[in-house]
Image: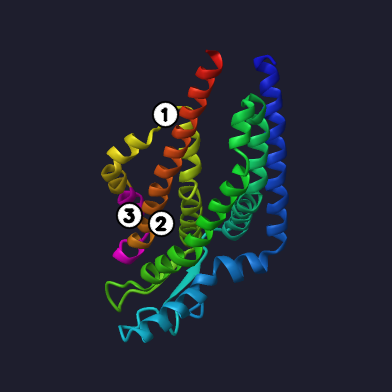
Amino acid sequence: MSFLQHLEVLRWHLVRSSAAIVLFAVVCFIGKGILFDEIIFGPKDPNFITYRLFCDFSRAMNIKELFCLDEMPFEILNTRMAGQFSTHVWVSLIAGFILAFPYVLYEVWRFIKPGLHKTERKYSRGIIFFASFLFILGVLFGYFLIVPLSVQFLGTYTVSREVTNLIDLNSFISTVSTVTLSTGLIFELPILVYFLAKIGLLTPAWMRKYRRHAFVVTLILAAIITPPDISSQVLVSLPIVVLYEISIKICARVVKRQEKERLRNQEAGQ
């Protein structure tokens, strides 16, 4: 196909992906009670499952009960006329993107699949499942671990009893959405490494050589998407380090497989 024909095909893939996101966003918009009261503001509830589990753990270990909360000492307020409506629309779109993510990946795969060789298609089987699984796993990790830590630390932190925490609605929503989406995308690291290794931009030797640099970048990322306390940064850093090590194994396997394919082609040519 010509360049313009490729653009036309890409346009329809983007249209279908956007339609799926909008469809799920409409469903989330209608289910406002569940979306906000149960999910978005769930970590504000002292009885949220994460707080209860950490509280039980701290009691079992006979340490200070940091997460045994009676109440969250802050209120969420809206200061703009259209603030609640625009927040409703924006959060619905984010939720729609998360729910439609597997289908969006499917549309991306349909666009690039015709350009792959038969062996590349074979080795890429299951890529949509694994990419979707990692993304959802990252979103759940961020929501059930990092978001509660962020809300508990930032929402209860005070410099003086004279100061009352009145948190802006957009600030709270931004914290929840940024953390969940960031961790979801970070968990896609093995998939990204797989494709970079396939096109020859990454090698396991290079990844091992710059492992220490990657750990420094990991700490920086953890500091950006988490509140400024050590526990949150460690919780984010550990899975990223594990994913990096897994990515090295994936990269090594891809390179080894490509080397075998090259030798096989050489033997067939002789």
Closer to the observer: label 2 or label 3? 2
| Residue type, mark 2 in image | Pro
Residue 155 appearing in the image: yes
* Residue at which label 1 appears: 201
> For numbered disc 2, what is the local secondary structure?
helix
Q: What's drawn in magenta, residue-wise?
A: 218-232
The earlier-in-sequence mark between 2 and 3 is 3
Q: Residue at x 45, y 59 (%)?
A: 175
Q: Residue at x 58, y 67 (%)?
A: 39
Q: Which mark is residue 223?
A: 3
User: Crowding at label 2, few (<14), some or many (≥20) Cα neighbours within 10 Å?
Assistant: some
| Residue type, mark 1 in image | Leu
Name the image quarter holding residue 5. Answer: top right
Q: 123 or 167, which lies in front?
A: 123
Q: Which mark is residue 239?
A: 2
Q: Is residue 232 above or below residue 55?
A: above
| Circles 2, 3 touching at the beta carbon (< 8 Å) | no
